[in-house]
Amino acid sequence: MGSPVLFFLVFCLLALFVHAADLYKVLELSKSASEQDIRKAYKRLSRKYHPDKNKDPDAEEKFVEIAHAYEVLSDPTKRQIYDRHGEEGLRAHEGGQQHYANPFDMFQNFFGGGGHHNQQVRRGPSSVSEFEVSLSDIYSGASIDFMVKKRILCDHCRGTGAASSDDIHTCSACGGSGVRIMRQQIMPGMFTQSQVTCNECGGRGKVIGRKCPHCQGNKVMDHTQHYTLEIPRGAPEGHEVVFEGEADESPDWEAGDIVLRIRSKKERGGWRRKESGLYWKETISVEEALLGFERNLTHLDGHIVELKRQGVTQPGYVQTIKGEGMPLFEGTGYGDLYVEYNVVLPTEISPETRKRLLIAFHPETHGAHSKDEL
Ligand SMILES: [Zn+2]
Ligand SMILES: [Zn+2]
C-alpha cells in the first residue's frame, strides 16, 4: 500500500480508535514529563513503529497513536487542556471537531524531510566512557546493570526553575529578547551600537518570580539512573553501545548520548583475544612434551576443549584448534583457538630417575649389559 491516499484513509480510520488511550502512556511518559522528554519519546517511538521499518501488523496503528499523542503533548496549550479536561476538553476547545496532522507528514518534518525548525535544537554534550567487562561476558554475551550519576530536569518545574507557570515573567529589561542594544560614543558625534546579552535575565528573556522549591530554581537535579548494558556476543574491542539522549539534561539543550566503549579486562595468565582469535598458554611436563598427552581445557563458558597431542611437542609450539575462538560478531560461527605450549622441567631428579634416563638415552653405554657405574 504505497499510495498516499490509501495511507490517509487508513489513518482516518485509525484516528477513530485513538481517543481511548492515555496520551502519556502512549509515549511511555509520566505526567511530569518535560518538553524534551516528549520530543525524545516521540523520536524514539515513531522510528520504532514507522510502518516502513516495523512489519508488525499493529505497528501502523501504534505509529498513528504516537503521532497524535505527540501533537497534543508537544503543544503547551493543548497539553494544559488535555491535562485538565482530557480528550473531551480538547474536542470542546476545537469546536467539537478534532483535526489531527497527518502522522507521516509529521514524521517527515520532525526528522528533517521538510523545514529545518527541529534541526536548530542544540545538543548537549555526550559522555563517552570505557567499560571493562570480562572476556567470558563477551564470549557468551551478557546483560550488565550499571548506574550513572547525571543531571536531569527537575520534574517538579519541568526545568523552568519556577514555582509555578505564573512565576515566569517576560524580562522587562530586554522585553524578552535576551539582548540589549548598547550605544557607545567613540568620538564626538560618532556612535556605535552593539548587542550585549541582557544581564537581568542572563539572555533567556524570562525572569523567575518564586523559585521552584524542589530544585531551588536550578532547573536540574542530581539523579542516579540504572541502565542495562547488553553486550553482544563477540563484540569487538572498543565496540560502542549508545544510550541515545541519556546524558546530562538541561533546559538549554537536548540531552546528548551516553556512549560506552566495551573493552575486555586484561587478566594475567588467562585468556587473550585478538579479534576473533583466542589465545591460551598451557603448561605441560617434560614427559608430556616427549610422549604426548590428553588434557581438558575449560573454555570461557565452561565447556571442555580436549587438548590432544601425540609424539613430541616443542616448547613454544602453537596448536590451532578450529572453531574454538571468539564468536564472530554479528555473524555465525567462531574464530580459532591458539594454544601455546610451555614445557616445565623438574627442578631436580632423583638418582634413580637419573639412572633410568641414562639407560633410556644411552643404552649402548648404560644399558642392562654395561658394567659402568653411575
Ligand atoms: Zn524545579
Ligand atoms: Zn532580559
Image (cartoon, rainbow, N blue to C red):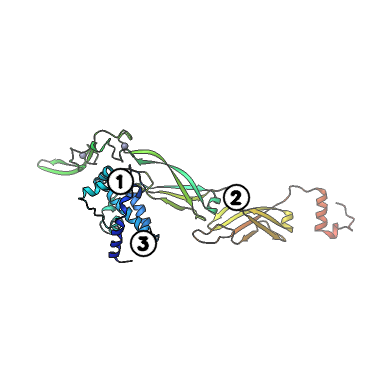
Q: Is residue 213 above or below residue 230?
A: above
Does residue 356 appear to the left or right of 239 in the view shown?
right
Label 2 neighbourhood size at 10 Å, few (<14), some (14-19), many (20+)? Answer: few
Label 3 neighbourhood size at 10 Å, few (<14), some (14-19), many (20+)? Answer: few
Q: Residue drawn 81% across and 57% down?
A: 360
In the image, residue 211 lies at what x, y percent? 28, 34
- The tag earlier along the polypeptide, 3 or 1, is 1
Q: Find out whether the residues at labels 3 and 2 contact each other: C-beta distance under 8 Å.
A: no
Q: Is residue 264 above or below residue 331?
A: above
In the image, residue 197 lies at what x, y percent? 22, 41
Given residues 162 and 45, the one toward you in this image is: 45
Q: Residue drawn 24% across and 48% down?
A: 90
Q: Amino acid at mark 1?
A: Glu
In the image, residue 183 lies at what x, y percent? 15, 41
Q: Amino acid at mark 3?
A: Asp
Q: Which residue is mark 1?
A: 35
Q: Is residue 118 above or below residue 1?
A: above
Q: Is residue 355 above or below residue 225?
A: below
- Secondary structure, mark 1, is helix
Q: Which residue is mark 2?
A: 270
Q: Find out whether the residues at labels 3 and 1 contact each other: C-beta distance under 8 Å.
A: no
Quarter of the image for residue 212 reads top left
Question: Can I make out residue 254 in this image?
Answer: no
Q: Amino acid at mark 2?
A: Gly
- The tag earlier along the polypeptide, 3 or 2, is 3
In the image, residue 316 lies at what x, y percent? 65, 56
- Secondary structure, mark 3, is loop
> Separation of disc 1 and disc 2 at Cα?
50 Å
- The tag earlier along the polypeptide, 1 or 2, is 1
Q: Residue drawn 69% across and 55% down?
A: 295
Q: Which residue is mark 3?
A: 52
> Separation of disc 3 and disc 1 at Cα?
27 Å
